């Protein structure tokens, strides 16, 4: 039986650091407020690069870690909520930047859950034998689209730029054991970027821009409550489907949205801190990049090792939420 597994992982963050103290000079906020409510201390921001540029940097690192070359990739899956353009997607731009042949490239738009959804997509294509080596990228440039004024402070302080990537390939033993994916579109406007969009004619107006409707908006407390509940549910769903308990898992990786959410889930599920790895204090919420960025750093730091059984989980805009069980 043909399975899929992760062959290599890499990440990239732009070098420019934007601290909470820097934000204090741009809006009515404070380092204390941001740390206490979110756990974030700083985040990375691009100067000129685009999402596909960050994705490229992470991709070449992941491909090298897999012991492969770009020409060995036969499908690109690009997860992002901040593509370079409304269309075409970031995947085709990455295909061009990698200088590879005319391979397929698809974008997926599941925001913070994009990486886990992408794992499921890649797994399907490998298990059916359609493709050998799938490059899955999660990359975001949020900073160019945030409202860095007091009006946008609840959202702007949370998000950061970055990228992570994995290469998946075929395996006799299961690497990706399972995935559980969910959505609930009735909450689409709890965390969203309303305009521009085809729901409107015209897609955006000068008045919309004046009112800041091109910036992401979030009902923070509602998102917080749903996130806490859904993270717990989808992790339990993954464990139950594999006849596992928390004790059987070596590492849990949480989408890095808010340290209070991560602590609440860890407490409820009795997950010890030694089984988690967090980096949101340095990067903030990098949506689709968050999980691979975390997992890649955990590999580099020696926390995530070959043979480990891991459970990544995510929740975000849509709402969407997802988990997976993976043998590293
Ligand atoms: O990635 C997808 C998943 N996303 C999430 O899971 C995010 C979930 N939500 C959250 O993390 C939290 O709701 C936030 C961190 C966004 C906000 O924390 P909160 O404890 O829910 O604060 P709040 O929205 O209830 O706001 C409390 C106060 C308000 O002032 P008043 O009305 O009490 O006077 C806000 O205006 O904090 C104010 N506030 C700020 N103050 C200083 C909001 N943003 C800021 C800010 N600095 N940046």
Image (tube, rainbow, N blue to C red):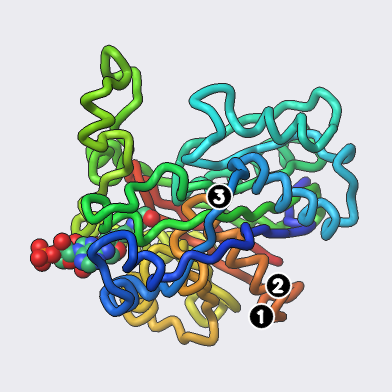
Q: CA distance from mark 2 to mark 3?
A: 17 Å
Q: Position of residue 157 (x, y in %)?
A: 35, 61
**171 on left or right of 30:** right
Q: Label for residue 115?
A: 3
Q: Nearer the viewer, residue 111 or 22?
A: 22
The residue carrying pointer 3 sits among few (fewer than 14), some (14 to 19) or many (20 or more) residues within 10 Å by Cα, namely: many
Quadrant in which residue 48 is drawn: top right
In the picture shown, does residue 186 fall above or below 203? below
Residue depicted at x 52% and y 78%: 276
Residue depicted at x 65% and y 74%: 298
**106 on left or right of 217:** right
Q: Nearer the viewer, residue 294 or 88?
A: 88
Residue depicted at x 27% and y 20%: 205
Quadrant in which residue 128 is drawn: top right
Quadrant field for ligand 1: bottom left
Question: Can residue 244 be seen from the camera position used here?
Answer: no
Q: Position of residue 323 (x, y in %)?
A: 48, 57
Residue under label 1? 303
**19 on left or right of 53:** left
In the picture shown, does residue 149 fall above or below 250? above
Say whether mark 3 is within 8 Å of ligand 1: no
Sequence-wise, the earlier of marks 2 and 3 is 3
Q: CA distance from mark 3 to mark 1?
A: 20 Å
In the picture shown, does residue 264 fall above or below 219? below
Marks 1,2: beta carbons within 8 A: yes
């Amino acid at each position: 039986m043909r399975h899929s597994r992760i062959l290599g992982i890499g990440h990239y963050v732009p070098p420019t650091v934007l601290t909470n103290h820097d934000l204090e000079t741009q809006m009515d906020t404070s380092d204390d407020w941001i740390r206490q409510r979110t756990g974030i201390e700083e985040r990375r921001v691009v100067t000129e690069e685009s999402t596909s540029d960050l994705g490229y940097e992470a991709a070449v690192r992941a491909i090298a870690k897999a012991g492969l070359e770009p020409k060995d990739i036969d499908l690109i899956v690009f997860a992002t909520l901040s593509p370079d353009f409304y269309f075409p997607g970031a995947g085709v731009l990455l295909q061009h930047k990698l200088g590879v042949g005319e391979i397929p490239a698809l974008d997926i738009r599941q925001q913070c859950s994009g990486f886990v959804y992408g794992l499921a997509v890649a797994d399907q294509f490998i298990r059916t034998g359609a493709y050998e080596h799938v490059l899955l990228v999660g990359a975001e440039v949020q900073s160019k689209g945030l409202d860095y004024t007091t009006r946008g402070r609840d959202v702007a302080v949370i998000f950061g730029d970055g990228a992570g990537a994995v290469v998946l390939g075929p395996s006799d033993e299961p690497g990706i054991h399972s995935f559980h994916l969910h959505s609930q579109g009735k909450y689409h406007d709890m965390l969203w970027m309303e305009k521009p969009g085809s729901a409107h004619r015209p897609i955006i107006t000068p008045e919309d821009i004046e009112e800041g409707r091109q910036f992401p908006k979030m009902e923070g407390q509602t998102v917080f409550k749903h996130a806490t509940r859904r993270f717990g549910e989808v992790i339990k769903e993954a464990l139950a489907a594999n006849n596992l308990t928390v004790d059987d898992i070596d590492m849990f990786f949480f989408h890095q949205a808010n340290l209070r959410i991560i602590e609440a889930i860890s407490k409820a599920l009795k997950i010890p801190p030694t089984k988690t790895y967090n980096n949101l204090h340095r990067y903030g919420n990098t949506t689709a990049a968050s999980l691979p960025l975390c997992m890649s750093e955990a590999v580099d730091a020696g926390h995530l090792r070959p043979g480990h059984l891991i459970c990544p989980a995510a929740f975000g805009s849509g709402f969407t939420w997802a988990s997976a069980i993976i043998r590293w």
